[in-house]
Image (spheres, grey):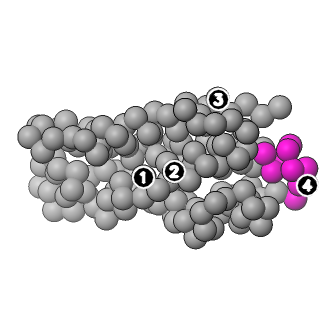
Amino acid sequence: MIDYDNFQKSLKRLEEQYKNYQAFDESLPDVTQEAIAESVVRRFKTCYDFSWKVLKRYLIEDLGLADVPNSPKGIFRLAHENNLFASPLEDWLRYADTRLFKNHSPLEGESARQGRSPQPRRWGDKQQACLKLTGNFIDDAIDLYQTMSGETWE
């Protein structure tokens, strides 16, 4: 039996922090805004990692597939072939590309070189892309969780 607990918990934490990110007030200190946004990016990465790893187990254990790839993109392609996604495969491949950024630093660009802490909206393109995709990822991950576990998301 597959344990979905880590995937579920990471998804709930991501969902909670993303709501905080969407609701934060521009009057908050820059460091607080940055901390909230950075937390969303980190939680996205954690949840993404749990999603593809539990999906791999699902493909092997529940669907009985013998030849399952070890890479997230290969797993996503196989999941798509088995109709496990409500969203297009391209969305899941985009999530993979977002997760696999080579630069893990949240600070990029001119303000980072000058030693200043940038506001989240001044982050590099990679981090901004992650923040923009997070809402869609949450919806798709919830759908995947419900498909695999058979449980309704609360």
Q: Secondary structure at mark 3?
A: helix
Earlier-in-chain disc, 4 versus 2: 4
Q: Secondary structure at mark 4?
A: loop
Q: Report the residue at 78% width, 45% height from top.
A: 58
Crowd class of label 1 (few under 14; some 14 to 19; many from 20; radius 10 Å): some
Report the residue marked by disc 1.
Answer: 135
Q: How far apart are the alpha carbons under marks 4 and 2?
A: 29 Å
Q: Give me the C-alpha separation between circle 4 and circle 3.
A: 24 Å
Q: Identify the residue position indicated by label 4 in the image.
A: 66
Three-letter amino acid code at disc 3? Asp
The relative height of residue 134 versus residue 92 in the rendered view (above or below) is above
Specify few, some or many for label 3: CA neighbours under 10 Å numbering under 14, 14-19, or 20 or more: few
| Quadrant into which the C terminus falls | top right
Magenta span covers which residues? 58-67
Front in this rendered view, residue 67 or 116: 67
Query: Which residue in the structure is indicated by mark 2?
Result: 139
- Percent coordinates x, y for residue 39 in the rendering: 35, 39
Q: Is residue 124 above or below residue 31?
A: below
Q: CA distance from mark 3 to mark 2?
A: 18 Å
Dot 4 and dot 1 residues touching (CB under 8 Å): no
Q: Residue at x 60, y 63 (%)?
A: 87
Question: Label 2 sits on what residue type?
Answer: Asp
Secondary structure under badge 1?
A: helix
**Marks 1/2: CA–CA distance:** 6 Å
Chain-order first, disc 4 or disc 1 = 4
Asked which secondary structure carries label 2, the reply is helix
Going by the picture, which residue comes out furthest to the left?
27
**In front: label 4 or label 2:** 2
Residue annotated with mark 3:
5
The reply to whether dot 3 and dot 2 touch (C-beta < 8 Å) is no
